[in-house]
Image (spheres, helix red, strand yellow):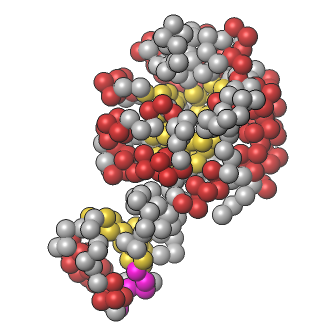
Amino acid sequence: MVIILRDNPAQKQIDSLVSWLKEKNLDVHIVKGAEQTIIGLIGDTSKIDIDSIKTMDIVEDVKRIQEPYKNVNRKFHPDDTVVDIAPGVKIGGGNFQVMAGPCSVEDRNQVLEVAEAVKVAGASILRGGAFKPRTSPYAFQGLGPKGLEILEDAKNKLGMPIVSEIMDISKLPLFDNVDIIQVGARNMQNFELLKELGKTKKPILLKRGLSSTIQELLMSAEYIMAGGNGQIILCERGIRTFETATRNTLDISAVPVLKELTHLPVIVDPSHGTGNARLVKPMAMASVAAGADGLMIEVHNDPVHALCDGAQALTPEAFGSLMESIARIRPFAYKR
């Protein structure tokens, strides 16, 4: 349930209303937006008399939220959330960012070479996998802690915030210097991990699961927000369908749908969404046009010899061309 207050309500009246609501064993969240102040209620609101609340002088309207996700619901928080990643690097609310880098960290020279190239081209965040979930137990699993050290070294040398994937709660202390913790598609419903990340104050990049609905994605985000962490970035990365021409089916329609349902920023990963480097550019451009708040692009200095997902990685030159095309499209991007 949300209570929408009139303009310039008296603080004494707000305090009185909040105190009364808390006596009903409800969690009360006050959201002061650009145009409205909203009181969000979480808990059993079935016994609350809506009509009696509507008669209060400071109340403009009262609405019940039918969806099971409350904190991430745009009805609860009408203004876009802006995630503050690093000084000068924000995403959401009109702030657009590109995360780029290799799928997996292979060695120090590779990461530095790619990082320098993507930064020159306009990327603001360096991506790289230190821990890699792979379908085959014999495939390259990443360098682990050493990979994180290499990413941190690139961060310190180039001044780029970094994003990397976590796979297990026990590894959380290793991510102290990681600016954005990524939850991969396979872990989207690892609820114990989500609960633990909810206790942190770090930005979380939450990828949509391979076969997950939009509501399931939002419910996973709700787990993190319920723990107290509202710094969440949602990522559409393709879902599994019967189509075999691409690695996944990139659901670009999810971008405007999510924009209507939630206040959280939404980015798109066309690299995993297609699995084909030739398709990354057109799908990235389409994602920007659909209103995405950012992109996650895989870039490798030698894709043919990449240890992970080389087929979908752009060369630095191709990435530079993509960034030029994005700059031309952004002024015409869809806005809700």
- Outermost residue toward the front in this view: 242
Question: Residue 50 occupies which quadrant of the picture?
Answer: bottom left
User: Where the C terminus falls, by quadrant?
Assistant: bottom right
> Could you tell me which residue is drawn at 80 percent across and 23 percent down?
317
In the picture, measured across the screen, residue 58 lies left or right of residue 278, that is left
Vertical relation: 127 (above or below) 191: above
Magenta region, mostly helix, strand or loop? strand
Vertical relation: 14 (above or below) 254: below
> Could you tell me which residue is drawn at 82 percent across and 31 percent down?
321
User: Where the N terminus falls, by quadrant?
Assistant: bottom left
Asked if one can make out residue 4 in the rendered structure from this viewpoint, the answer is yes
Identify the magenta region.
57-62
In the picture, measured across the screen, residue 305 lies left or right of residue 126, that is right
User: Quick check: is 248 in the magenta stretch?
Assistant: no
Question: Residue 118 occupies which quadrant of the picture?
Answer: top right
> Could you tell me which residue is drawn at 73 percent across and 10 percent down?
304
Question: Residue 10 occupies which quadrant of the picture?
Answer: bottom left
